[in-house]
Amino acid sequence: MTNQLTHPKMTSLQSFISGLLGIALLLPASFFMLTLLARVIFGTKSWYYSIAPSFLQSPFDPLAWHKAQFILGCLLMAILLNGTSYRRHWLNLAIALQGLLLLVVLVAYTLIQHIRY
């Protein structure tokens, strides 16, 4: 009887914890998009050029740990952790969709940069 009463609280707590973890995993990509936006609107170059060249390093060595691999890896982890949860919560779904949108934008950015250079 007590197991049935505590089980719903555990699933909501687990979805909340995975939501917080997902938000933390979205931070590197959000920071890069913020620096990209500042570069486009205001023309600031310092933070953008400290992150952007790692997207242009070719070939991507799987054992090297570039900033781009960290950003894309965090996005994939956020999508997988929040998109494949057993009981979906609105926060988990929102984080998974936000991560998917950021992933699409970053892949498009990477393709444009590789075609451009």
Image: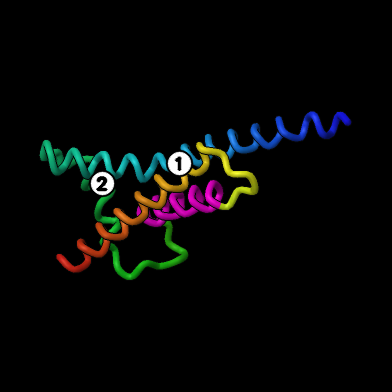
Badge 1 marks a residue whose secondary structure is: helix
What residue appears at the point 47 percent right and 54 percent down from the top-left corner?
76
Which range of residues does the magenta coloring cover?
66-83
* Crowd tier of the residue under label 2, counting other residues whose Cα lies within 10 Å: few below 14, some 14–19, many 20 or above: few
Q: Earlier in the sequence, mark 2 or mark 1?
A: 2
Is 66 above or below relative to 2? below
Of residue 5 and residue 75, the one placed in the foreground of this image is: 5
Q: Which mark is residue 94?
A: 1
What residue appears at the point 58 percent right and 44 percent down from the top-left corner?
88
Amino acid of disc 1: Ala
- In magenta segment, residue 73: yes
What residue appears at the point 25 percent right and 64 percent down from the top-left corner?
111
Query: What quarter of the picture does the N terminus occupy?
Result: top right
Query: What quarter of the picture does the C terminus occupy?
Result: bottom left
What residue appears at the point 56 percent right and 49 percent down from the top-left corner?
81
- In this view, the residue farthest toward the right is 1
Amino acid of disc 2: Ser
| Residue 80 spot, x, y in % from top left | 53, 53
Question: Do the CB atoms of the residues marked 2 and 1 lie less than 8 Å apart?
Answer: no
Q: Which residue is mark 2?
A: 50
Q: Is residue 55 left or right of residue 37?
A: right
| Residue 100 spot, x, y in % from top left | 40, 52
Q: How many marks?
A: 2
